[in-house]
Amino acid sequence: MSDIIEAYTDADLAYKIVLLKKLCDLVIDEFKAAKQIAGDQFPKGAAIPARTGDDVKLGKVSKSDPKPVAEVVDRDALADYIRAEYADKLETRIELGDIAQILPVLLDAGRTDLFTEVEVIPDYLYGLAKAAAIKGQAVPGVEVKSPPGVVSARAELAAEQEVRRLLSGARVPLLRELEA
């Protein structure tokens, strides 16, 4: 900060604040719209420099190149696939019937017709199937999608100087001059 004291009338300060608020709103809206256009227009992995007309580098805009992700769209079809592909890795659990009926019988004879063995697909097998789909294998119930990529920007000091130059010349300057 500088030792220079900036003095405004109340009206000038209100003017500046209202304009800066509106400027923020407009700039954020325009920024979002420009990023949306860049997201649609730039290829994944792009890194495009931003330059002034006299070739001063202001920064760069880039678009990420995310890896494909697998999404389960039909869990039943995927479960059938896993049962066929990973039959030897399936787990089972025992589900007992009505305990009030089972307990006396079990105490007398230990019968096995009152419980059910249920096949269980462990969660890691879903992960294996999704990984196989990402590698190009056809896996029922899994759809592989590539995310669209994220647009980001990095500005250089020259960009700040250019913005300050554009916004500092108003009747009540919206931005302070850069201090030397």
Image (tube, helix red, strand yellow):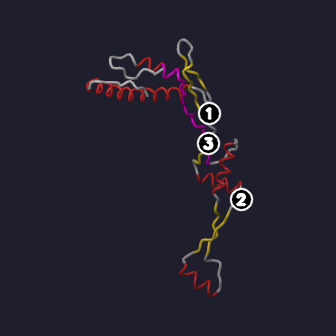
Where residue 31 appears, as percent x and y from the top left, is: 46, 27
Residue under the point 63% across and 88% down: 108
Magenta includes 124?
no
Q: Distance from label 1 to label 3 (Cα)?
A: 12 Å
Q: Amino acid at mark 1?
A: Asp
Front residue (pair 119, 43): 43
Q: Is residue 110 above or below residue 123?
A: below
Q: Amino acid at mark 3?
A: Val
Residue under the point 58% across and 30% down: 63
What residue did someone put label 2 on? 87
Q: Amino acid at mark 2?
A: Ala
What residue did someone put label 3 on? 69
What residue did someone put label 1 on? 65
Where residue 51 appears, as percent x and y from the top left, is: 55, 17
In contact (CB < 8 Å): disc 1 and disc 3: no
Residue under the point 65% across and 83% down: 110
Front residue (pair 165, 139): 165
Where residue 47 appears, as percent x and y from the top left, is: 60, 26
Magenta includes 144?
yes
Q: Residues within 10 Å of mark 2 (few under 14, many from 20)?
A: few
On screen, residue 125 versus residue 54, left or right, reads right
User: In the rendered structure, which segment of residues is drawn in magenta?
Assistant: 141-161
Residue under the point 54% across and 11% down: 54
